Amino acid sequence: MAQVKDVLQKPSSFYDRFFRKPDRYQEDTHYCPGCGHGVLHKLIAEAIDDFGIRDRTIMISPVGCSVFVYYYFDTGNFQVAHGRAPAVATGIKRTHPDAIVISYQGDGDLAAIGGNNILQAANRGENITVFFVNNAIYGMTGGQMAPTTLIGQKTMTSPYGRKAEWEGYPMKVSELLSTLEAPAYIERVALTDGKNLMKARKAVRKAIQTQIDGKGFSLVEVLSACPSGWRMTPVDAKKWVDEVMTKTFPPGVYKDVSNEREVGSWARHLEKVPVEKYHEILGLTGTAMEVEGDMNEVPENFRNPRVLIAGFGGQGILLLGQTLAEAGMRHGWNSTWIPSYGPEMRGGTANCHVKISETPIGSPVVSEPNILITMNQPSLERFEKSLVPGGLLIYNTSMIDTKPQRSDIDILPIPATEMADEIGSLRVANMVIVGAILEKTKILQKDIVLDSLNTVVKHKKFIPMNTQAIEKGIEYVRNFKQ
Amino acid sequence: MAKELIKGNEAVIKGALLAGCEAYFGYPITPASEIAHAAAKYFPLAGKVFLQAESEIASIQMCYGAAGSGVRVMTASSGPGISLKLEGISYAAGSELPIVIVDIMRGGPGLGNIAPSQADYNQVVKGGGHGNYKVIVLAPNSAQEMCDFTMLAFELADKYRNPVFVLTDGFNGQMMEPVEFPEPKPINVDKTSWAAMGTAETRKNLINSIYLDPNEMEEHNKHLQEKYARMEREEVRFEEYKLEDAEIIGISFGTVSRVMYSAVDQAREKGIKVGMLRPITLFPFPKVKIRKLAEKGAIKAFVVSEMSNGQMVDDVRLAVEGRKPVKFYSRMGGVVPTVAELVEQFENAGK
């Protein structure tokens, strides 16, 4: 008697009454007679009961006939978009490694619209369990062709039978996913006779156990009858699974490395870091040298400078600008830096715009610079015209053969690349220019600029060479005779 | 606290971490990629999740999972990626999930280019996905606001259980500016009443957007509309610039608003009485403020400028309701209007 009672009793991981079901029949499921979903639900619910994981479990309902999985399971529940269950499961599991996350999907959901999502979740070895119901058809939407529809099988969208030459072959998900390295366990089972049901029960348990043990991704493909979609009686449908479907989709274990993996090896728990450490992690605790700058002490034509810096990619154009902007900020001024970007990037030139100002900066774009740095020939040709009358042009004579055309501007020629070469690296030509700007314009204080290198230069071992280049630029301007 | 010279995109992530963001799921796209780079760098050090998703579609769904299980989560992209995320955003709005989404707009349509643009206004502000939903949209125009508004976005997302956008253009993402970062903010939000966290306490909870019965679906829609109405009452934010004696009102957001500060100043030097209203929330839109301005006798005209074909200007016209002329100046495809161009617009509007 006890055994009979056990069989008839609902697992406690099912709701007593399916209260979310919007009709009067809250004792029964919404599935058709002979459908495999109800059987699979029960196998899963029993496993959840037996493993004692009901409180930790989150079931994911897909789109398809099993869209209402949440009617039945007395667990945490998500209903999600078509095909996206593995991605949603990833989001839950990564942020809640102790939750047991079960993705329940049909063949249209998993193998068609969500094909990439399941492939990638499997490939990342998400520590989740996927139950994949393969019934070779779209059941809920009215019997259309699925990726798993058999060759010759007639559906609403393959009324003359599926042809390989037109629609391709049935998608063998278990075989496909088992070629990946990350998954721990993949098995295909069939919900037909008692023996196969026992295999299915074992597979369901193993797949959940694999997740509990933190061993990574597991998937059970379940061949399941769809009498309504196939236009068959439940008895014939079950027979069709056994005799026809299994020919294309042979049951069996396709991958199992669960025994080779350490418990917890794919569980992905993260270390708890106290919030007090965030500023340190974000690099916000540094002590930068700062001064109170006074724009009034800056020569009038260089006040609130608008700097346009242009040259080849690789000449350190962006870093040059960042150094100026960083140092400007450390004088207590507003500063902006914006890189060449979008339509500005053409003709082999990279450029950036820097504004330093005692008042708030509106547009960060420098269309009319009062300081123009050109490191190569095309830059001089392109931007010379934009300099305001009385502005400063610094141009790199190492890379520019022609002389500037303008007579209404202040011009400083400097062989920056050659000077950098003398120091030992062509890459510090940009810092030679920084030195030249320092000495020529008196906008920025030298000690602040040198300290700024600690922030803007990524590799600390290059700081001495950059410092040397700045010194050299300063010296050049001091000795420069027009 | 020392200031840091930092790209807007990177300031987003530092702000997110200080706001208690637990996870970032994203996909690379220019000009938003520095956001993912910064998350990849800092989140693991702080014990948070960074995961590069297989697609934009997957990344927003990962956010759906994380948000539905009760943690602060974000993603970021640019227009082409946001188009793909709209599916998930509609679901998140339907299921009432707090997700922060950053959109660094680039030129379109199609692949377009990577230059700054504002042409995602309609798809973001008007709810580009299916169904009757709205999202709060914050529009920063500086690196400091990229940090501040990201932090605010997390608060608003939790307050309303709703997706919140931080919407700006490529310039504002790429530009470096001094930013002062605040102390980490303690989070006092209890989500156990609705989130499914894999605990006994939350076992009863369901994250869901299905309401099969049309009457129930309508009830849910009404509930959402009430929530959006509350946002319109409580969350309208804008900045006024030299509006007191203004006769011409410039309206713009993001990078265009920075150009417009300068244009207002220059136009005033020429004797034109112009001021600017900068919507900070694009939804809820400051329509009451604009209508009140339109009702003022001294106001002659509105000048709206956008790096788009004219998307926000529709909202301005709806607020003005024909009371005053609304002129529109458009640059598209990655071109930023210049100060001189906007000054000319102000001059013409005053004639």
Image: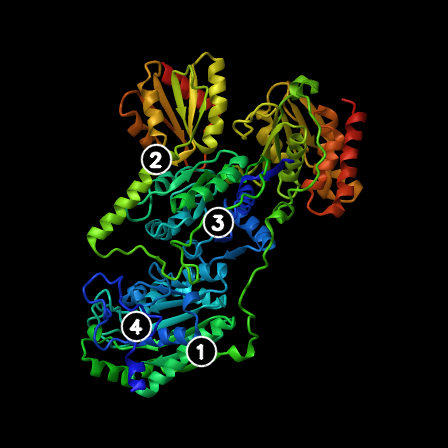
Pointer 2 local density, CA inside 10 Å: few below 14, some 14–19, many at least 20: some
**Residue wearing tag 2:** B232
Q: Viewer-proximal residue, A332 or A466?
A: A332
Q: Viewer-proximal residue, B95 or B26?
A: B95
CA gap, disc 4 and disc 1: 38 Å
**Residue wearing tag 3:** B29
Task: Tell me what residue is drawn at x 55 percent, y 74 percent.
Answer: A263
User: Quick check: do tags 3 and 4 share a chain?
Assistant: no
Identify the element where label 1 is drawn. helix
Closer to the observer: label 3 or label 1?
1
Identify the element where label 2 is drawn. helix
> Label 4 marks which chain's residue?
A
Percent coordinates x, y for residue B314 in the rendering = 31, 32
> Label 2 marks which chain's residue?
B
| The label number, if any, that marks residue A206 in the structure image | 1
Percent coordinates x, y for residue A264 in the rendering = 55, 70
CA gap, disc 3 and disc 2: 32 Å
**Residue wearing tag 4:** A165
- The reply to whether callout 3 and callout 2 are in contact (CB within 8 Å) is no
Closer to the observer: label 4 or label 2?
2
Identify the element where label 4 is drawn. helix
Please, what is the three-letter code of the amino acid marked with disc 2?
Glu
